[in-house]
Amino acid sequence: MSFMLSHFQAAVLGTLQGVSELFPISSLGHSVILPGLLHWQIDQNADYFLTFVVATHFATALALFLVYRNAWARIIYGLLSSIWALEFRPTNPDAKLGFLLIIGTVPAGAAGLIFQRQVQRLFISPAAAALFLMLNGGLLYLAERLRRNAKASEDLNRIDERIAAQMSWWQSAKVGLTQVLALLPGFSRTGSTIAGGLLIGFSHEEALRFSFLLATPIIGAAALLKLPVLLHSGSVFAIDNAALGALCAAVAACVSIKVLTRYFQTKTLTPFAIYCAAVGLLSLIVLGVAR
């Protein structure tokens, strides 16, 4: 059988995905490196493994949507109202934020569709994921060093309004381009988009908020494209594992959202940069010795 996970492994990888997808430490990187370090006999290049990963991603996207459901209700209503009125440069902040999120989603969505098979081949290489994890640490560190000074957000209740007021269409596209890096296992989607937000002048809270909103459509769309493959596989065991992993990912994601929202009110990306560089380097050493 080309794909096999025990229930324990599914629970571990699901929980790991829910945490590492939202923390700026790369969920794909950890999902590739951990089985390699623990010598789990998993075919990470199999379609079923990719589908399992996507199922846990879908659960994370669902958790993000539910946590920010009030914001999404405003954004969707603003978008539909603007489209109905044929107003494509809206003054309504909710509508503008919706268009900014669409623009930011396009680069990674297009790259994912075009390079899907090439990226999937990297899933079989824990060493490549470890190297990219180190580079992810470098990206986070550079973002903190090069970021424009921005005041901390004092009123989180109006954070979406401030994002819409500050951000241009081109800036949204630039942040979206950084999200393309997350197609490589080891680069963090959250980390790259927070870094992009910091470099255009956002505070940490604003960069995190935009990153979380931007994550929902791209992760959700990728999951919807792949989930039918799992559901039509006919493998009850694979479906059970995906469901278990998704449940663990959703719970872990909800906890992660609360922790990170509080953390970035006063802290920076630097500890995560050190973590990624250290874990990536240590993983390379261990994987090299194990050969």
Image (cartoon, rainbow, N blue to C red):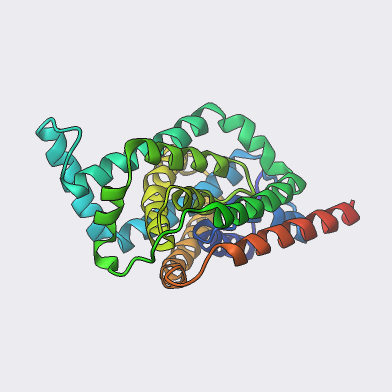
Kindly identify the residue that appears in the image at 62 percent across and 35 percent down: 119
Residue 42 visible here? no
Kindly identify the residue that appears in the image at 46 percent across and 30 percent down: 110
Name the outermost residue toward the front. 149
Kindly identify the residue that appears in the image at 53 percent across and 64 percent down: 19
In the image: residue 248, left or right of residue 127? left
In the image: residue 154, left or right of residue 41? left
Say which of 37 and 277 sits in front: 277
Kindly identify the residue that appears in the image at 47 percent across and 53 percent down: 148
The percent position of residue 178, horizontal first and vertical second, equals 51, 42
The percent position of residue 253, horizontal first and vertical second, equals 45, 64
The percent position of residue 244, horizontal first and vertical second, equals 50, 61
Residue 137 visible here? yes
Name the outermost residue toward the top. 114
The percent position of residue 42, horizontal first and vertical second, equals 70, 50
Say which of 186 and 140 sits in front: 140
Q: Is residue 242 above or below residue 7?
A: above
Q: Is residue 19 above or below residue 111?
A: below
- The N terminus - image quarter: top right
Say which of 203 and 120 sits in front: 203
Residue 107 lies in quadrant: top left
Q: Is residue 261 above or below residue 25?
A: below
Image mark count: 0
